[in-house]
Amino acid sequence: MKTAIITGGSRGIGEAMTLKLGEMGYNVVVNYRSDSSKALTENVIAKLKAYYSVEGLAVQADVSKYEDCERLVKAAVEAFGEKIDVLVNNAGITNNAAFCELPREKYMSVLETNLISAFHMCHFVVPYMVKANEGCVVNTSSIGGLMGVANQADYCASKAGLIGMTRALAMEFGKQNIRFNCICPGMIWTDMLRGVNQDEVAALAQSIPMGKIGDVEDIANAMEFLIKDKYMTGQYVSPNGGIYMP
Ligand code: NAP
């Protein structure tokens, strides 16, 4: 049986990815942080079993914290063994606030949750992949990592950092058959988008060439592609309705 770990896997894009991993035949370690997401996580794990006959393991952990990531990976290994086939670093937050008014703790929290968490998770997972001489890491970056967005200096920096880390690790571990790639979603309907200024969302949505905001399944499909294509490494794919074209 194959094993995948996903951070922030119980709602939004993460939920769609968790279900896609189940459909692909993986046992899934589903991380969540908030107490309010416990029931959601149990629900998505019940779906894994009912729809795809795979196992799920819920692990509450704040992935911005090194010790929590260590405990998360330990729980995964105890439940499903040392072979971790896929790691999806998906957990993320945003402040969407004017730069000069943003307190240090708030921008540090975005950097730690979106970027440093991926360092922690790779630090604990990659040694198992090296042992197995194979593995696949998918990092949820953003179009914010590719282009500038006002009021999102912390978010854009964290997501661009994720792309840099992905490329460097792809270089370092290519020979060991461990692939690292990013997804850079455009605007996707989730709580994250619902949580920011809706006038700004509406204005931005109008500038999308496809004229619509994307669905979480669009991003889960991109993850499936990155896992399945065995020659893909150090890249990003950006399902974004055409709002960003390099
Ligand atoms: P969301 O619905 O707000 O979900 C965020 C997820 O991250 C939740 O599962 C949350 O867990 C988890 N999370 C946050 N901080 C965490 C922490 N410290 N430790 C563990 N988990 C944590 O947002 P989403 O839109 O699905 O976002 C998923 C990813 O896509 C993020 O990385 C985001 O930056 C990226 N993205 C989203 C969009 C968009 O338009 N929606 C566009 C580009 C990129 P809890 O439920 O426990 O809080």
Image (cartoon, rainbow, N blue to C red):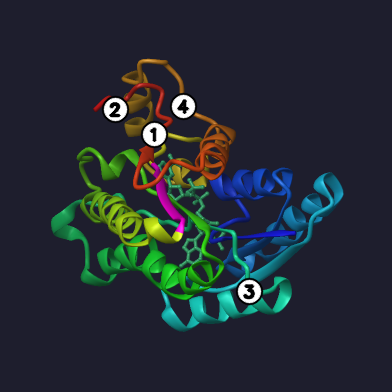
Q: Earlier in the sequence, mark 1 or mark 3?
A: 3
Mark 2 is on which residue type? Tyr
Tell me if residue 117 comes above or below residue 149 in the rendering.
Answer: below
Q: Are marks 1 and 2 in contact (CB under 8 Å)?
A: yes
Mark 4 is on which residue type? Ile
Nearest to the observer: residue 196 or residue 214: 214
Indicate the secondary structure of the residue bearing disc 3.
Answer: loop
Q: Earlier in the sequence, mark 4 or mark 1?
A: 4
Measured as percent of width and height from the top left, residue 175 is found at 39, 58
Number of the label disc, if any, that sits on residue 213: 4
Measured as percent of width and height from the top left, residue 38 is found at 68, 65
Mark 2 → mark 3, Cα distance in angstroms: 39 Å
Mark 4 → mark 1, Cα distance in angstroms: 13 Å
Q: Nearer the viewer, mark 4 or mark 3?
A: 3
Indicate the secondary structure of the residue bearing disc 4.
Answer: loop
User: Picture quarter containing residue 184?
Assistant: top left
Q: Are marks 4 and 3 in contact (CB under 8 Å)?
A: no
Indicate the secondary structure of the residue bearing disc 1.
Answer: loop
Q: Which residues are magenta?
A: 177-183
Mark 2 → mark 4, Cα distance in angstroms: 13 Å
Label 2 sits on residue? 244
Describe residue 56's horizontal placement relative to residue 30 as left or right: right
